[in-house]
Amino acid sequence: MSRSNTRLSAQLRRTGAVDGAHHLANACSSAGQTAEGMEALTEAFEIVGDRDERFLEAELTLQIVLSVERLRSEAEGYFLTAIEVARCQQAKAWELRAAMSLARLSDDRARPL
């Protein structure tokens, strides 16, 4: 998480602003910063639990599911790149490892969340 996001996250934590953490997660996700968005969503869920502010809990849950899907899409691209690099290097063990990871990811996608 960037330094400014960390400061904002700490401020949201102090004030218990679930809605602010929710918007931070949206902004991170829109900027292609999926991991940072997940951190903000985790922070928002902690606030929900600490403060019993449940009015956005359903929306936060939906955002987490969508973020996980984005992360899976990103992971698929990285696995495909790893397979191609391993093939170019004739590194059969690394190719197999990346292919197995990609297969597990595909299998996970076939199962409902």
Image (cartoon, rainbow, N blue to C red):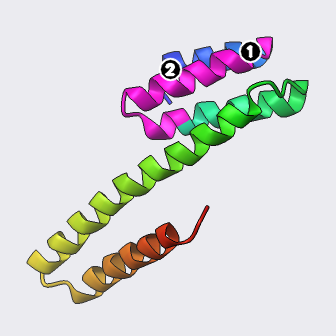
Image point (52%, 33%), residue name: 37
For the residues labelled 1 and 2, the Cα–Cα distance comes to 19 Å
Q: Residue furthest left?
A: 88
Report which residue position mark 1 lands on: 17
Image point (63%, 34%), residue name: 41
Give yes or no for residue 31 being in the magenta stretch. yes
* Predominant SS of the magenta segment: helix
Image point (59%, 66%), residue name: 112
Residue 110 drawn at (x, y percent)? 49, 72
Tell me: 5 left or right of 100.
right
Report which residue position mark 2 lands on: 3
Residue 88 drawn at (x, y percent)? 9, 76
Tell me: 55 left or right of 6.
right
> Is residue 6 visible in this depiction of the protein?
no
Count of picture labels: 2
Write down the region rendered in magenta.
15-37
Question: Three-letter amino acid code at disc 1?
Answer: Ala
Q: Residues within 10 Å of mark 1 (few under 14, many from 20)?
A: some
Tell me: 48 left or right of 23.
right
Question: Three-letter amino acid code at disc 2?
Answer: Arg
- N-term-proximal mark, 1 vs 2: 2
Residue 66 drawn at (x, y percent)? 52, 44
> Is residue 37 visible in this depiction of the protein?
yes
